[in-house]
Amino acid sequence: MITFTMDGQQMQVAEGRTILEAARERGIPIPTICYHEALAPFAACRMCLVELANRRGGQLAPACAYPCEEGLIVLTNSEKVRRSRRMTIELLMASSAHVPLIRAMADELGVAAPRFTMAEDDCILCGLCVRACDEIVGVRAISLVNRGIAKEVSPPFRIASNACIECGTCVLICPTGAITLADVTGGGHSVHPWQSEFDAIDCRLCGHHPEAWRFADPAAALTEEVAP
């Protein structure tokens, strides 16, 4: 077991646990956007930064990816942490201030409006959809493309291949609603009408290709059971 201190509380955790996992187990709130329990830590959004106290005055580290260490002193709500989170949420608000998740986080941090603006966009580039498609489904039909301010998610309805199996995992995991089920299914019809010499990939979880998931009402795909 590892013994360390978080917000003045001494605690013990098993080796390999992250700061975020330890905090959640003890009800200590640390905001996250790009983190999901079913996926490997990504540390992209920087909302979960915490301060690690040391002789140099402390350093910021992502709680979702930083492992608990013996004797570590963690501050989850110091002024340095709050200042960093306010800057992060302000950057996200530049294009996504209209997104309920971002608006709620901004209100909690006391950020009324960003000092700069960009074109409105529902996607906050958290990478959850890309990672879920890869790590959970095992298909890799979508990816992050381009760099800098041109960076974006290239989703299944823009990819000219049959890699997407239309499972809807990207829709379910998206925290902002940037990808909808209608986007993936094409409103009940396959978004991949072209012919391919390659067989469609089966879902890693259920072992089937969701060919039967094409409904007149796309929302029905969330409640219907896939035939074995």
Image (cartoon, helix red, strand yellow):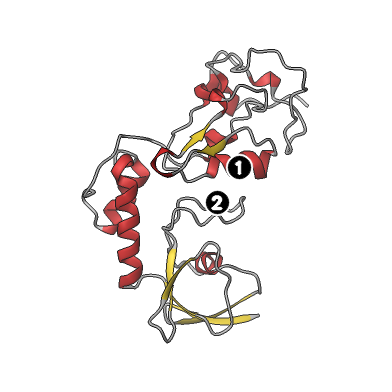
Q: Position of residue 152 (x, y in %)?
A: 46, 37
Rate crowding at label 2 as few (under 14), some (14 to 19) or many (20 or more) other CA atoms within 10 Å: some
Q: Is residue 153 above or below residue 9?
A: above
- Identify the residue under disc 1: 132
Residue 57 numbered mark, or none:
none
Residue 36 numbered mark, or none:
2
Residue type at numbered disc 1: Ala
User: What SS does tag 2 mark?
Assistant: loop
Marks 1 and 2, the one that precedes in the sequence: 2
Q: Is residue 105 above or below residue 228?
A: below
**Side of 146 relative to 86 (left or right):** right
Quadrant where the N terminus is found in the figure: bottom right
Q: Give me the residue at 63% from left, 32% from top.
A: 141
Q: CA distance from mark 1 to mark 2?
A: 9 Å
Q: Are marks 1 and 2 in contact (CB under 8 Å)?
A: yes
Q: Position of residue 160 (x, y in %)?
A: 61, 21
